[in-house]
Image (spheres, coloured by chain):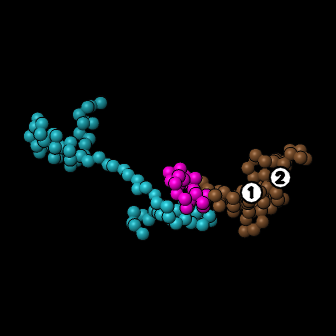
Amino acid sequence: MYSNNRYARRRPAAVYEASAAQTEGDAQSEKRDAAEQVYAMAYVTPQSCGEIFSDSDALKYGTLFPALYLPYGGGRRR
Amino acid sequence: MTGKEGLMRSITEVSFTLDELRLFLDTHPDCEEMLSVFQAKKEERAELVGKYTEKYGDVEGYYPETKNGWSWNTAPMPWKKEADI
């Protein structure tokens, strides 16, 4: 059967424990909780005018710009 | 890779370079360096397409020869031996 409670408990474990440790109904600690939850932020650095591949290399690598050629290395930076 | 196949390969390559440059120039319209590369590649592609069209027929579907009737669909299909790909 559908239960609200079940879904309410689905919060990141660390956050859940931290707020559980605080006194219930404490407005101040609720506020602190919210501040600690940092959102992800995306950004793109503007591309500069640099080197380019030859036509045949560009087609092979899928980009004209060596600066954008970043083959996936299994999470390790090459 | 030579002849028809090589020519088509060159057209594909220079076309990709132009696609990339177009995207770059959309966000960097003042980059003089890439503007001149674009101009050069544009001319290179026009020359290659002209050469191909003259020898093997229209590439893009916009310029089929019509002097002697409809020619767009008269070239051998790529999987035919006569296509020589």
Q: Is residue A4 rendered magenta in the image?
A: no
Colour brown, chain:
B
Q: Which residue is mark 1?
A: B49
Residue at horizontal 62 percent and vertical 65 percent from the top: A56
Colour cyan, chain:
A
Nearer to me, B2 or B55: B55
Left/right of residue A14 with respect to residue B49 in the rendered view: left
The answer to whether residue A69 is visible is no
Nearer to me, B79 or B71: B71
Whichever of labels 2 and 1 marks the residue nearer the N terminus, that label is 1
- Residue A27 placement (x, y as % from top left): 12, 36
Quadrant location of the C terminus of chain B in the rendered image: bottom right
Give the label, 2 or 1, closer to the camera. 1
Q: Amino acid at mark 2?
A: Ala
Looking at the rendering, the stretch of residues picked out in magenta corresponds to B20-38
Other residues around mark 1 within 10 Å, as few (<14) / some (14–19) / many (≥20): many
Give the overall secondary structure of the magenta segment: helix
Q: Is residue B30 rendered magenta in the image?
A: yes
Callout 1: residue from which chain?
A: B
Q: In the rendered image, which quarter is residue B80 located in? A: bottom right
Q: Amino acid at mark 1?
A: Val
Gap in Å between the C-alphas at discs 2 and 1? 16 Å
Secondary structure of the residue carrying numbered label 2: loop
Above or below residue A7? Residue B39 is: below
- Residue B6 placement (x, y as % from top left): 73, 65
Secondary structure of the residue carrying numbered label 1: helix
Q: Which residue is mark 2?
A: B75
Q: Residue furthest left?
A: A23
Quadrant location of the N terminus of chain B in the rendered image: bottom right
- Residue B46 placement (x, y as % from top left): 72, 56
